[in-house]
Amino acid sequence: MGSGGLELPPGGEGHEGTSTDVPPGAVSLARPMNAGAIGPELDWDADAWHEVRTRAQRAGRAYIWLNLVEQRLRAVVAAVLRPIYEPVHGDDWVVAAAGPAGQEWVQRAVAVREVSRRKGYLLDPADDNVLSFLTLPQLRELMVQHWPCFEPYVDERRDVELALDELEVTRNVVSRNRALSEAVLNQAERASARLLEALGAGSDLPSTRRLPVDAVEDLVGDRYADVVAVHSDRVRLLRQFPAEDIFGQARRVDALGIGLNLLVQNFSGRRLLRLAESGSRVRLLFLNPASSAIKRRERELGIKRGELSRAVETNILHMRRVRSRLRDPGAFEIQVFDETPRFTAYLVDGDGADGIAVVQSYLRRTRGMEAPVLVLRNGRNGGRVVKPGQADQADEGGLFPTYREEFEQMWADSRPVS
């Protein structure tokens, strides 16, 4: 009998009470599990680790966007409402701006601020104010309550409210560390970009008209030179970055490669003709279909002799037909080179600060459609964020100038197609 009046189970073998019969009224106590039985239940397999990493990556991206939006909205609210309320209410201007309708949540923010002060959570003195403790919905409420004050600075109230509505689902999921689907993440990224644009915080890089700057690129872009996207093959590139987005508004296109299929086969001749007639300059540099280099490439790919040569010749003839219909054929130049092809590159507006480049290296036994693709942004300082102390190195390490220089050298050593 135990000290609590409960009947203990019988002992192990070799002890008194080895009978398996349990007296009536006795409570059976579960035997402890040995340590070896616990381990396998706590282990995660590869699928489980993949799932949690995917969740963390999505939540991290969403958090960056939400953080940018909240900081921008906080700055806008302060810029508009502080001059109205601070002269009368001083440091309590946020409480006054919240008014009777917002007393509950603003007082809660005041209380959280005081707790953060006592516990040493305020690491930056700039955050020691009530406004820094308001959530996204509360900042929205301040804007809605005082919309006449914001109307001169924000074009469409409806657009702002719709974007904030779309972000609310993501904000709740991220704050509670729950699973965020890719569809909801994509929606949140689009809504955040629209909201930042509406609040006057859109990117000032000219190339964003063609390839929007991603929030993650803005923060960690300096780790990857001027590479803004990597795709495992050209199919995935075109799914995310269609040919119309790449070439559609170009004022200059410089392309170097074997057959230039990305441009010739994915951007219609009619569109290319309109582009050239509108003042764009096009320079296309093909591998000479009669060269020994194209025969070596055919052997590498294991295709029939003459197959690649005929495909390149067909592309050249198609581009010649486009050129023949132009009033100024000099704006549409076609040349061929005889050297071993090392990469294909499409430099769009490569002479300016808003350039975009799509680059693929040629791999043995791998067709161009299947080769990995890099997307580069020229932009201001290569489209990168320059950290303190790196101003002198802002123009170093980018890949865009390397491929632009290589194109110019190849162009100078090639010959024109009549």
Image (cartoon, rainbow, N blue to C red):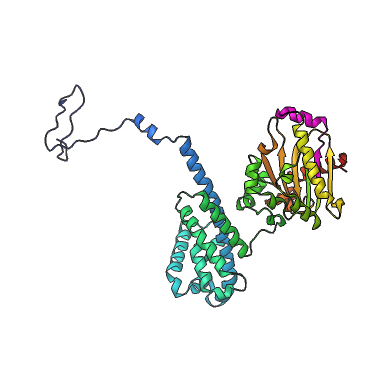
On the question of residue 31 being in view, the answer is yes
Magenta residues, as a range? 284-304
Q: Is residue 288 highlighted in magenta?
A: yes
Measured from the top left, where is residue 27 in percent x and y? 17, 37
The N terminus: image quadrant: top left
In the rendered view, tell whether residue 339 sits above or below residue 358.
above
Check the image and name the residue furthest to the left.
24
**In the image shown, does 355 or 402 lie closer to the viewer?**
355
The C terminus: image quadrant: top right
Left or right: where does residue 284 sit relative to residue 61?
right
In the rendered view, tell whether residue 79 sits above or below residue 7.
below
Instruction: Say which quarter of the image contains residue 192.
Output: bottom right
Measured from the top left, where is residue 95 in percent x and y? 48, 71
**In the image shown, does 360 or 83 lie closer to the viewer?**
360
Q: How many marks?
A: 0
Residue drawn 84% across and 42% down? 335
Residue drawn 17% across and 29% down? 10
Instruction: Say which quarter of the image contains residue 152.
Output: bottom right
Measured from the top left, where is residue 233 in percent x and y? 64, 40
Residue drawn 56% across and 69% down? 157
Q: Is residue 31 highlighted in magenta?
A: no
